[in-house]
Image (tube, rainbow, N blue to C red):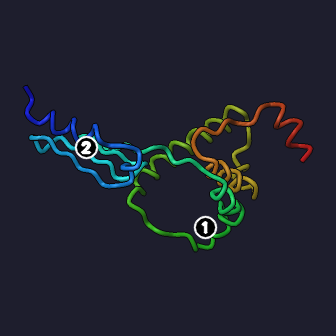
Amino acid sequence: MNMGSEYVNEDLFGLEDEDIGERLIVERMSPTFLVEVVTEEEVVVGRFLQKKPRQKGPMDHFFTPNAEMVVQNRRSGKMNQTTINDAYKKEARERACMLITRWMYEAVIPFNAVTYPSFQPMIEAIGQYGVGMKGPTFHEVRVTNLKK
């Protein structure tokens, strides 16, 4: 029989939706097991933190900066701040640049196309959209977007 399981089950059984915002820590007999409800977005089980993916709402779309202005500010050096994740961002950037280069090579797009003024705002707009963006269809590129 596990001595600490009744203690954990009793405390978790009484947990309701209104208790989610409060900080609740339930420890078993062994100090390695921990259940912690920090906010409605974060739940710590054991030693692992699980977060819900961030969803963009209407305010995010309202305050998202214009892609052209972001590029202009980067070139002038106004938006430079070192972060902890710079090494990971560098690896992710190298991978993305390799995939862009491979696509340009396969599609026979001249490499000097990256010097066009419209290239960097395109990359910035893709980054602002976030993960899971589907590329434009043939019809969108050929008809819909050319008419705009």
Mark 2: amino acid = Val
Residue 67 horizontal/vertical position (percent): 69, 59
Residue 68 horizontal/vertical position (percent): 72, 62
Quarter-of-image position of residue 98: top right
In which quadrant is the N terminus drawn? top left
Mark 2 and mark 1: Cα distance apart in space? 43 Å
Check disc 1 and report the residue beneath it: 74
Q: Could you tell whether 64 is left or right of 15 in the image?
A: right
Under tag 1, what secondary structure?
helix
Residue 133 horizontal/vertical position (percent): 64, 39
Q: Earlier in the sequence, mark 2 or mark 1?
A: 2
Residue at 68% of width from left, 31% of height from top? Answer: 106
Residue at 55% of width from left, 43% of height from top? Answer: 96
Under tag 2, what secondary structure?
strand
Mark 1: amino acid = Arg
Which one is nearer the viewer's eye here, 75 or 125? Answer: 125
The answer to the question of whether label 2 and label 1 lie on touching residues, with beta carbons closer than 8 A, is no
In this view, 25 is above or below 103: below
Quarter-of-image position of residue 28: top left
Residue at 75% of width from left, 58% of height from top? Answer: 117
Residue at 23% of width from left, 50% of height from top? Answer: 25
Q: Could you tell whether 61 is left or right of 38 in the image?
A: right
Looking at the image, which residue sits at the far front? 14
**Around disc 2, counting alpha carbons within 10 Å, would you say few (fewer than 14), some (14 to 19), or many (20 or more)?**
some
**Around disc 1, counting alpha carbons within 10 Å, would you say few (fewer than 14), some (14 to 19), or many (20 or more)?**
few
Label 2 or label 1, whichever lies nearer to me, is 2
Check disc 2 and report the residue beneath it: 35
Q: Could you tell whether 28 is left or right of 117 in the image?
A: left
